[in-house]
Image: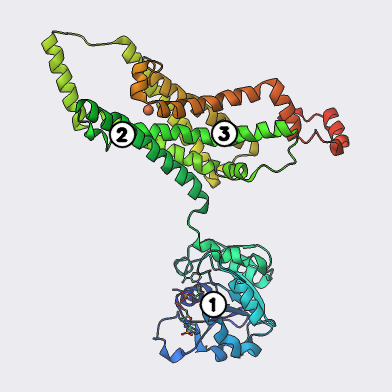
Amino acid sequence: TNSVPLSVGDPMVCILGSGDFSRSLSSRLRCCGCRVVVGSRDPQRLPPGLFPEGVELKTQRGALEGKGSLVFLALYPEHYPSLLTLRPLLSGRILVDVSNASSLKQEGLSNAQRLAQMFPCSSVVKGFNGLSAWTLLTGAYDHSRQVSNELSVLALAQRLGFGAVDVGGLSASRALEEAPLLLFPSWRGPLLTTMLLFSFFYLYIALKNVLMPFLDRAENNLHHLPLITVNQALPAVALVMLSLVYMPGLLASVLQLYRGTKYKRFPDWLDQWMCARKQLGLLSFLCAALHAVYSVCLSIRRASGYMILNAAYQQVKAGVVDSWVETQVWRSDLYLSSGILGLGVLCVLALTSLPSVGQALNWREFTFVQSGLGYTSLVLSVAHVLFFGWDFAFLPRAYQYYLPPVFLLSLVLPCCVLIGRFLLLLPCCSVPLNRIRRGWESKQNKPERERQENGAVFGDV
Ligand SMILES: NC(=O)C1=CN([C@@H]2O[C@H](COP(=O)(O)OP(=O)(O)OC[C@H]3O[C@@H](n4cnc5c(N)ncnc54)[C@H](OP(=O)(O)O)[C@@H]3O)[C@@H](O)[C@H]2O)C=CC1
Ligand SMILES: [Fe+3]
């Protein structure tokens, strides 16, 4: 690591502990021109060259005898009590607690709060714990959050190239300590929903198309399991998930209409469902994209080669010269085209859900894309299913093949959502809903309401 020459005016930072975090942090601090002193229980034990040039290695006491008000504790919280003998040296200094929680939902105080209790004469700042030693060492830039409004720590984080955010007092430290332990918390519900739906559809289709024919007529369709059955379950999951994205918004509108106000909290389940829409939509996109890839591969399967050859042979034997069926040609072209378009629109939706793209849009553009294009893709997907089954969709034969629950869920659910959306667009619903959303319904808002009705605020209705 390149080290910057020391100068007297550089800020002096003390780090207690000589482990991974301490080494990475000291490298980064040196690169950014800070003076660093590391305090170890046994500095003699440390092999030479472990720390970058310019970092002073001392005993814990020796390190704290120097100047510098910032002390990083690069220790595990179990070892904090071993610092109690240094209390006089630590008092009046800023202790930065970089530790993480060892498990979620621990009882009692957070690590930082316990540290603050142990050292009442020091001020404790939680921060840097979301950064890995690797991030610090490789020079990657990441955000760092800290609690307790200690400007010097904020300034130091900024000097190290991190966008520091002050998230409040020490009581917020638990959330920061637990954050690195969380595993995709917002994805758990949507992932579980996807997996349950997929299992349900897959098992049902396997039962109907593989097991039943086998038991009934000893027909061997086992080869359907790895590809065909998956490819039948995927679009059903994609459609149901896409409906689940738009359903909570409709329910919320209906609830607002029914209550006549927007100033009441939605029930918790609806709140959580609304917050999961992005994940549900992205998983729906994933299923749709997989369905597209699977479908493209259908014709390169060995089985399809055999099937074409067999059909051709049968045709030759039967003396049929031309097997072109005009309606089938239209059907396949229409369902393919609507499916491709639906997937294309879903792609745009998925792209705008990326924070960097979403931030570049204003609110109106964002709702246009998320709501307008979302419903377009739902319409196209429904068209895809209808065209796919147009010659038999509502006939008993189709019922056998396209299986009532799969059919019902993957077609009826999106249709309900589309009809619901259409109904809410009718003036009898949209006019009162707009009034509610603008807060015009309540008596307390009367003056505001008159002002708005007289003013020209209709441009953005
Ligand atoms: N590594 C990482 O990527 C990250 C680590 N952290 C946090 O940083 C802290 C340190 O982690 P890390 O550097 O990886 O851990 P290490 O195990 O690498 O280092 C811990 C240091 O603590 C000191 N120590 C060990 N045992 C004792 C003891 N019984 N009494 C007193 N001091 C002791 C040692 O220093 P010495 O022998 O010199 O006294 C040791 O080097 C932890 O709280 C961790 O949660 C936070 C974010 C990322
Ligand atoms: Fe399809």
Work out whether 358 lies above or below 30: above
- Residue tagged by mark 2? 206
In-image side of 110 versus 337 (left or right) = right
Could you classify mark 1 by the number of other residues whose Cα lies within 10 Å: few (under 14), some (14-19), or many (20 or more)? Answer: many
Q: Give coordinates of residue 132: x percent, y percent.
A: 48, 67
Q: Nearer the viewer, residue 2 or 337?
A: 337
Q: Alpha-carbon distance for marks 3 and 2? A: 29 Å
Q: Seen from this angle, which residue lies furthest front?
A: 216
Spatial CA span between label 1 and label 2: 53 Å
Q: To which residue does mark 1 refer?
A: 77
- Mark 1 C-beta closer than 8 Å to ligand 1: yes
286 vs 330: above or below: below
Residue at 73% from the left image edge and 34% from the top image edge? 259
What's under tag 2, amino acid-wise?
Answer: Ala
Question: What's the colour scheme?
Answer: rainbow
Residue 449 in the image, given as x and y percentages of width and height: 84, 33
Q: Quadrant of residue 90?
A: bottom right
Tag 2 or tag 3, which sits nearer the N-term?
A: 2
Circle 1 or circle 2, nearest the eye: 2
Q: Any mark on residue 199, and which?
A: none
Indicate which disc residue 247 carries: 3
Is label 1 in contact with label 2 (beta carbons under 8 Å)? no
Q: Is residue 67 visible?
A: yes
- Give the secondary structure at mark 2: helix
